[in-house]
C-alpha cells in the first residue's frame, strides 16, 4: 500500500514539474508573447498556398493529359486558365517581397 | 496497487482540466509559456493514463481478484492472451483504453505538428483536453476500473465467444479508429477558434484521418470475419445497432476523405468539410454511447448503466458548441470558387458525398427509430434487415458505379466527347460481363447482377488507369514497365493508393453480392451414415467424437464431402461446452474453395444424445473475396499513408518563408 | 469576371429531393418494422411483434421437430407475466433459462407462435453478437 502511495506521490510531483517547466526555465523571459502570425504574414501564407494550389493544378492537368483523361481540346482550353492563375499568384507574391 | 491506479486517473483528470483552462487562456491572451505549459500537461496526462493502464494490466496478469474488474472479466483458467484482452472486454477497461489512445494520439499529433502548425496547436491542446477531461471524469467518478472487493478465489471467467484471437485485434482497432477521428475534429475546432481557416488543418490531419478510417475499416472486416467464423450463424453482418455504430462514422469519414480533396485543390466546400468532420466525430462518440447505454435493444450492449446519460449529454454539448462555432465563422468560410459543371470531378465527389451521407443517415434513422417511436408512440418499433438492405442497394450501387467514373473525369469541366472516349472500353467490358453472367444464371437476382456489372466496370477503369499511367511514364523515359509502374505509384501515392483501395471495395462488393444474392441453404436431420445434398455438394455424416479441451468439452461431427463425383475430404462441425462459464458455443465447419472463393458452411445445430445431428448447411459463393478485399484494403491504405518526404519538405519550406517558428 | 449562375445548387437540390423521394417511397411501400414489446404487453396485440424478455423454464420439445416450448416473462418482472412460447428453427447457443432473448412472432390462442429462426439472445456486458436463423 505504501509503495502505491509513494509511486502516486512521485507521479503527481513529476506532473506538476512538467506543467511548471516553462515557467521554471524562463522565470523572466524577454517576451512572453505567443509567436503568432500578424495579418501581413497570414496574407503571405494564403498567397503561398494559392500559388502552390495553382501549380499543383497545372501539374495535375499535365498528368491527366499525358495519361489521356483530358483530351487535347480540353487541355488547350484549361491550361491557359490555370497558367494565368498561377502567374497571378506568383505576381502577387512577388509584389509583397 | 488499486490506489495507484485511482490516483493516476485523478492526476489525469487534473492535468486535462488544467490543459483545458490554461490552454484556452494562453490561446486567448497569446501567452507563450502558458501555452507550452498546457501542452506539457497534455503530454503528462498520457503518462499518468499509461500508469493507470499498467496497473490494470498487471492486476489482470497477476490474477489479482481483489480488483472487482479482474474478478468479473477473467478466471485462472483463462489463457494469457485472453486475459490481456479482458482489459478492453468490460466497460471500465474499455473506457481506460479510449483515454489511453486519446492522450497518446493527442501527444503525437501536437508533437508532429509543432513546427509548421504552431498557431493551430495552441488551440488544438484545449480541445483535446476537453475530450480527455470527459473520459477522465467518467473513469474517476462514474465507472472506475479500480473498484476493490474481498479477493475471491477465482474470477467469473470470460464468455467463450470472446476467447479467440479476434478479441485481441477487433476492439483495439475500432478504438484506434474512433479515437483517431478526434484528431481531425480537434484541428477543425482549433481552426474555427483561431480563424485559421485555410487548408492547413486539413493537411495536418490528412494522415490521421486516413489512419483512423483504415483502422475502422479493417476493424469492421475483422468483426465480420469473427461473426462469420466464430459465432457462426451463417452470416457476417446483422445490421445490429452496434455494428452500425462503427459503420456510420466510417461512411462519414469516407465522405470526408473525398471532399477534403476538393477543398485542397479548389478551395471549395469549407463549411461542408467542417460539418462532415463534426458528423464523423459525433458518430464515433454516438457509437461508443450505443455500445454502453443499453438504450437500444442490441445483442452487443454492455450492462445498462448511467454512463449512457453522460455520453448523450457530452455529445449534445460537443455538437451544439461546434455548430455555434461554424455559424459564427460562416463569413470566413465562404469560398471564392464555384462548381463550374455538373459533369466534373468536383461534381462526382459531391455526388459521392451525398450518396455516402444518405446511406449513413438512413442507417442512423434505422438505429434510432426504436427509441424515437417509443418516445412518440409509446412502442419501440424495430426496423428489420429488409430496410437496411434496401438502402444499401439504392445508395450503394450508384456509389459503386461512381467509383469508376470519378477518377476518370477531369477537374472543373469534362466534355462529352472526352467522356465517351474514356469510358468506351470499360463500358464494353461491363456489358459483356453482364451478358455473360446473365447466361450463367445470375439473372436470379437483379441487384446481384447489377453489382457484378458495375464491379466489372470499375475494375476495368482501375486497370485502365494503371495502364495509362505506366505508359505515360514510359514515354517520359522510364526503362521498363516495372520501373515505370513502381515510380508511377511512388510519385503519386495518394492517387494510386486510392485506386488500390477502390479495387478493395469492388472486391468487397462482389463478395457481398455473391454471398448474399446467390447463396443457398439446406437443412436435414441426419443419423450416422446418412447424406444430404446442397447444390453440387453431397455431405455424408460419418461419425461423432468428444474430447476434453483446455477449458471445454469439444463435440464434433465429421462429414465427408463430395462434389460432382470427386472426394473433397472431410469437414468437422459441432459444439464446445465450457465448464467454468457453463455455456455452449457453436463451432462451425467451413470448407473454402480456393478456386471459386466459395464456402461450404456447416452448422451442427442440434446434437441429440443418440448421435442424431440436425445440420444446417450454406453454400456462399465468392464470400472469400470479402476477406481478400480486407488485405487489398490494407495494402492500399499503407500506400496512401506512406510519408512523402518531398511534400513534407515543401510544407516546412512554405512555413519558413512566412516566418513561422521552426522549432520550439 | 462575370458570375455565371452556378449549377451546383440545382444539382444538390435535385439529388437531395431524389434521396427524400426514395426514402418516402420505401417507408410507404414496405411499411415500418415490428413493435418491440414485453410479454406483459402482449395481450393487446394481434399483429406480428418482436417479443423481448427472459426465458423461464421448463424448456421442453425440439426446435427442429414439433417445436421448442418454453415461457418468457418481462425483464425484471414477476413470474406472473410469463407467456407460453413455441419456437421452431435455429436456437442460439446462449439460449438457456434466465437469458434475455428476443423473438418475432404473433399470439395465437394464448400461445406465442414464433417465426422460424427469429430468435436472438442478448449477451449482457460483452461484445459479440449471438444470432441465428439469418443468412448473409
Image (spheres, coloured by chain):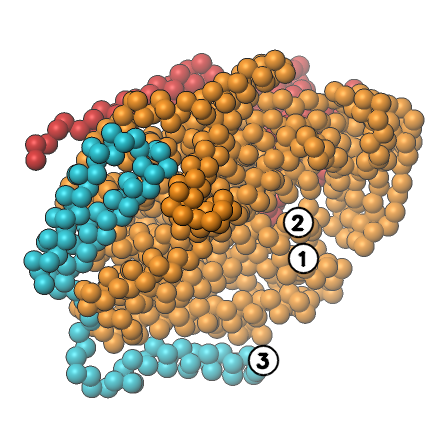
Determine the secondary structure under disc 1. Answer: helix
Q: Looking at the picture, does residue B409 appear above or below residue B282?
A: above
How far apart in space, not on screen, are marks 1 and 2 (Cα)? Answer: 8 Å
How far apart in space, not on screen, are marks 1 and 3 (Cα)? Answer: 28 Å
Chain at numbered mark 2: B
How far apart in space, not on screen, are marks 2 and 3 (Cα)? Answer: 33 Å
Residue B162 numbered tag = 2
Q: Residue at x 80, y 25 (%)?
A: B563
Image colour for chain B is orange
Q: Residue at x 44, y 24 (%)?
A: B425
Q: Looking at the picture, does residue B232 appear above or below residue B145?
A: above
Q: Chain letter for red?
A: C
Q: Residue at x 26, y 44 (%)?
A: A57
* Residue for badge 3: A1
* Residue for badge 1: B82
Whole-percent x, y for residue B361 in the image: 39, 33
Q: Residue C60 vs residue B458: left or right?
A: right
Q: Mark 1 or mark 2, which has the lower sequence index?
A: 1
Amino acid at each position: 500500500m505504501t509503495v502505491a502511495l509513494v509511486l502516486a506521490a512521485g507521479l503527481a510531483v513529476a506532473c506538476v514539474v512538467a506543467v511548471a517547466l516553462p515557467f521554471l526555465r524562463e522565470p523572466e523571459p524577454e517576451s512572453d508573447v505567443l509567436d503568432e502570425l500578424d495579418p501581413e504574414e497570414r496574407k503571405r501564407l494564403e498567397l503561398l498556398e494559392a500559388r502552390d494550389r495553382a501549380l499543383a493544378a497545372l501539374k495535375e492537368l499535365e498528368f491527366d493529359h499525358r495519361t489521356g483523361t483530358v483530351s487535347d481540346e480540353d487541355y488547350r482550353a484549361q491550361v491557359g486558365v490555370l497558367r494565368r492563375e498561377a502567374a497571378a499568384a506568383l505576381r502577387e507574391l512577388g509584389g509583397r517581397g | 496497487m488499486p490506489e495507484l491506479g485511482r490516483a493516476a486517473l485523478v492526476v489525469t483528470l487534473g492535468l486535462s482540466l488544467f490543459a483545458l483552462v490554461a490552454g484556452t487562456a494562453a490561446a486567448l491572451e497569446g501567452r507563450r509559456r502558458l501555452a507550452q505549459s498546457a501542452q506539457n500537461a497534455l503530454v503528462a496526462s498520457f503518462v499518468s493514463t499509461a500508469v493507470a493502464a499498467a496497473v490494470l494490466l498487471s492486476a489482470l496478469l497477476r490474477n489479482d481478484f481483489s480488483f472487482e474488474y479482474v474478478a468479473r472479466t477473467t478466471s485462472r483458467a483463462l489463457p494469457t492472451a485472453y486475459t490481456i484482452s479482458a482489459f478492453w472486454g468490460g466497460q471500465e477497461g474499455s473506457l481506460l483504453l479510449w483515454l489511453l489512445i486519446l492522450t497518446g494520439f493527442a501527444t503525437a499529433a501536437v508533437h508532429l505538428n509543432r513546427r509548421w502548425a504552431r498557431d493551430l496547436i495552441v488551440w488544438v491542446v484545449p480541445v483535446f483536453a476537453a475530450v480527455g477531461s470527459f473520459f477522465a471524469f467518467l473513469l474517476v467518478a462514474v465507472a472506475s476500473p479500480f473498484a476493490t472487493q474481498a479477493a475471491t478465489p477465482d474470477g467469473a471467467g470470460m464468455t467463450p465467444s470472446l476467447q479467440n484471437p479476434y478479441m485481441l485485434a477487433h476492439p483495439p482497432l475500432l478504438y484506434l479508429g474512433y479515437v483517431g477521428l478526434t484528431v481531425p475534429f480537434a484541428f477543425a475546432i482549433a481552426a474555427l477558434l483561431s480563424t485559421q481557416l485555410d487548408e492547413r488543418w486539413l493537411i495536418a490531419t490528412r494522415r490521421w484521418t486516413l489512419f483512423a478510417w483504415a483502422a475502422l475499416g479493417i476493424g469492421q472486416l475483422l468483426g465480420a470475419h469473427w461473426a462469420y467464423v466464430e459465432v457462426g450463424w451463417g452470416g457476417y453482418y446483422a445490421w445490429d445497432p452496434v455494428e452500425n455504430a462503427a459503420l456510420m462514422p466510417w461512411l462519414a469519414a469516407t465522405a470526408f476523405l473525398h471532399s477534403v480533396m476538393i477543398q485542397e485543390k479548389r478551395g471549395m466546400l469549407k463549411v461542408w468539410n467542417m460539418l462532415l468532420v463534426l458528423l464523423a466525430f459525433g458518430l464515433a462518440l454516438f457509437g461508443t454511447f450505443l455500445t454502453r447505454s443499453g438504450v437500444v435493444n442490441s445483442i452487443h450492449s454492455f450492462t445498462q448503466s448511467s454512463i449512457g446519460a453522460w455520453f448523450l449529454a457530452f455529445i449534445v454539448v460537443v455538437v451544439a458548441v461546434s455548430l455555434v462555432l461554424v455559424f459564427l465563422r460562416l463569413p470566413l468560410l465562404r469560398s471564392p470558387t464555384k462548381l463550374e459543371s455538373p459533369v466534373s470531378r468536383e461534381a462526382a465527389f459531391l455526388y459521392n458525398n451525398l450518396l455516402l451521407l444518405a446511406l449513413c443517415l438512413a442507417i442512423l434513422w434505422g438505429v434510432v427509430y426504436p427509441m424515437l417511436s417509443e418516445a412518440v408512440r409509446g412502442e419501440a418499433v424495430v426496423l428489420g434487415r429488409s430496410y437496411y438492405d434496401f438502402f444499401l442497394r439504392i445508395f450503394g450501387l450508384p456509389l459503386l458505379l461512381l467509383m469508376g467514373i470519378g477518377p476518370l473525369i477531369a477537374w472543373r469541366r469534362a466534355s462529352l466527347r472526352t467522356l465517351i472516349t474514356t469510358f468506351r472500353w470499360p463500358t464494353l467490358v461491363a456489358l459483356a460481363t453482364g451478358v455473360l453472367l446473365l447466361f450463367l444464371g445470375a439473372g436470379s437476382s437483379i441487384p446481384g447482377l447489377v453489382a457484378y456489372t458495375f464491379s466489372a466496370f470499375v475494375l476495368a477503369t482501375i486497370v485502365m488507369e494503371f495502364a495509362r499511367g505506366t505508359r505515360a511514364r514510359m514515354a517520359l523515359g522510364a526503362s521498363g514497365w516495372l520501373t515505370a509502374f513502381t515510380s508511377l505509384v511512388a510519385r503519386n501515392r495518394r492517387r494510386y493508393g486510392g485506386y488500390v483501395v477502390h479495387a478493395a471495395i469492388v472486391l468487397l462488393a462482389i463478395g457481398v453480392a455473391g454471398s448474399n444474392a446467390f447463396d443457398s441453404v439446406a437443412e436435414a436431420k441426419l443419423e450416422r451414415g446418412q447424406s444430404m445434398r446442397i447444390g453440387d455438394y453431397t455431405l455424408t455424416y460419418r461419425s461423432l467424437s468428444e474430447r476434453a479441451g483446455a477449458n471445454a468439452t469439444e463435440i464434433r461431427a465429421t462429414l465427408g464431402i463430395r462434389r460432382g463425383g470427386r472426394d473433397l475430404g472431410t469437414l468437422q462441425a459441432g459444439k464446445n461446452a465450457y465448464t467454468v462459464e457453463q455455456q455452449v458455443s457453436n463451432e462451425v465447419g467451413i470448407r473454402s474453395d480456393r478456386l471459386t472463393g466459395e464456402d461450404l458452411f456447416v452448422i451442427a445445430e442440434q446434437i441429440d444424445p443418440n448421435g442424431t445431428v440436425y445440420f444446417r448447411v450454406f453454400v456462399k459463393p465468392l464470400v472469400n473475396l470479402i476477406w481478400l478485399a480486407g488485405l487489398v484494403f490494407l495494402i492500399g491504405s499503407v500506400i496512401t499513408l506512406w510519408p512523402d518526404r518531398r511534400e513534407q519538405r515543401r510544407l516546412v519550406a512554405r512555413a519558413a518563408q512566412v516566418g513561422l517558428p521552426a522549432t520550439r | 469576371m462575370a458570375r455565371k449562375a452556378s449549377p451546383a445548387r440545382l444539382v444538390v437540390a435535385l439529388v437531395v429531393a431524389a434521396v427524400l423521394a426514395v426514402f418516402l417511397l420505401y417507408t410507404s411501400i414496405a411499411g415500418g418494422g415490428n413493435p418491440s414489446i414485453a410479454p406483459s404487453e402482449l395481450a393487446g396485440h394481434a399483429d406480428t411483434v418482436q417479443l423481448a424478455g427472459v426465458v423461464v423454464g421448463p424448456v421442453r420439445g425440439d426446435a427442429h421437430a414439433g417445436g421448442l416450448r418454453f415461457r418468457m416473462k418481462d425483464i425484471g418482472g414477476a413470474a406472473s407475466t410469463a407467456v407460453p412460447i413455441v419456437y421452431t428453427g435455429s436456437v442460439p447457443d446462449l439460449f438457456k433459462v434466465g437469458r434475455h432473448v428476443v423473438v418475432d412472432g404473433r399470439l395465437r390462442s394464448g400461445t406465442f407462435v414464433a417465426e422460424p429462426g427469429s430468435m436472438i439472445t442478448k449477451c449482457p456486458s460483452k461484445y459479440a453478437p449471438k444470432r441465428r436463423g439469418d443468412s448473409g
